[in-house]
Image (tube, rainbow, N blue to C red):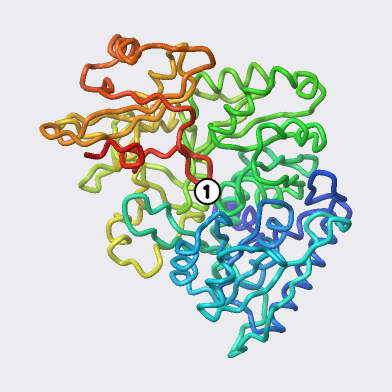
Amino acid sequence: MNSIGANEERYAADTISKLLEHGDSLAPVLAAPDRETLRYAGLRALRDRTVHALNAVGIGRGDRVAIVLPNGPEMASAFLTISSVATVAPLNPGYRGGEFDFYLSDLRAKALVIGEGADSPARAVANERNLAIIELAFDRANPAGEFLLKPRAAIARGTIEPDGAGPDDLAIVLHTSGTTSRPKIVPLSHRNVTASAINIRETLRLSRQDVCLNVMPLFHIHGLVGAVLSSVAAGASITCPPSFDALKFFHWFAEANPTWYTAVPTMHQAILSRAARNAASIAAGRLRLIRTASSPLPEGVMRELEKTFGVPVIESYGMTEAAHQIASNPLPPRKRIAGSVGLAAGPEIAIMNDAGDLLRANEIGEVVIRGRNVTAGYENNPEANAKAWTNGWFRTGDQGYLDKAQYLRLTGRLKELINRGGEKVSAIEVENTLLEHPDVKQAVVFAIPHPMLGEEVAAAVVLREDANPEEREIRDFVSARLAQFKVPRKIIFLDAIPKGPTGKPRRIGLATLLGLDS
């Protein structure tokens, strides 16, 4: 079979609804602590009821439905079923009224799905904007993920497309973080998200016997595709506890008996802090891998995770515009390289200079990608699209290089490079050096204003318990390992690093947050 034919067969399930057909009818698909498990037959029946219920109130293909639900199996099943008929826009339930007002307006949502009786500012905003409110009700006595939709009032029907969503229909619309500019809308088609889910399934060799313990928020692409949809693509199951809690992780771990979990580095570090007292649960488990993505994993954390759990840690690289996965370290016996995000794991990857030329191995430039899982373009933003695409390649905004073995190594985020008087400083490089200090538990490096240099290097540091080094001692430690222009001139000691809603440390805007921007 030629490569085109092989690809067509590989991605034959090109809608979320088709992916739901992968699981055996009686096989488990959604679970939650202290709940009965939902089977694939039950999830498919729920999908059919949801499609009918939404069509009945005037929602069909192309309509946008915002979802504001807490983490858990109902959020997972709402994503999987509502996206089979409409376009879902999952929103962080922790947003304030002004944020909901912006996102619901910007997304042009037709309806809001919210928990029955939930006291959320999203409800008031939806009422003010005359959006249809559909309450989602569930009973903990029923299988995890089972729900009933209850429209609060009749929805203006208009003309609807009642058929199930097709490959080119939008499955999800998400916003970029918007840390330096207005957030951009990233539309992802069913073709995009199913391709990414299948890529992750193949990278991790997921099968119907696998169980994922999902601790990632389900309003973010990492949790939605990296954990939930990739598992569905394998006919496997997902345990969906509430929002991440390191104090409860090992209770969930023992109950779910997962074969893998995926998280961001700050979560891994929190899990490690409680691992020693849960050694028996780890030893009794059947974990076969740990996946990490969404921000760089310090090499020391990787080593400690592998030593503690006795399984390979698979570092991956992704972004919303690629429906999550771009590159990944492979499973053994292939080589995993600490400090690298691995090999191309779905889209094509190249390195490009400012002029649009593709670079050779070991030459540093901007990481660019193209492929089935990459968005077709930002919505209603021709200026951003003109900057993001060059000769058919999407510019990720990340700086890095491909080594001779084609492993991708990231050296920084272009917008996060610190320009110290013309010298470009990689925040990641300085962070990794800080983390080598025996007293440093966590570190984030960021830019602060400087009257002569433009920008200066600063760091926020969390110390290990009972450690009390002087700021000068840590600077000397870095100075012995890096060039002087890379050494932080200001080090702030914190009890915790400020984080964004997905658990990633905040870097952009941290100077303002800490009062160091003047």
Name the residue at 49% across, 69% down: 104
Name the residue at 46% across, 55% down: 374
Q: Quadrant of residue 115?
A: bottom right
Identify the amino acid type marked 1.
Answer: His
Q: Quadrant of residue 78?
A: bottom right
The outermost residue toward the left is: 452
Q: Which residue is mark 1?
A: 324
On the image, the x and y values in percent for residue 59 come to 63, 80
Q: Left of 148 or right of it: where is 344?
A: left
Q: Is residue 105 above or below residue 459?
A: below
Q: Is residue 187 above or below residue 212?
A: below
Q: Quadrant of residue 506?
A: top left
Where is the C terminus found, in terms of image quarters?
top left
Q: Left of 250 or right of it: where is 103?
A: left
Q: Left of 293 or right of it: where is 58?
A: right
* Label 1: element kind: strand
Name the residue at 75% across, 45% down: 239
On the image, the x and y values in percent for residue 183 come to 39, 58
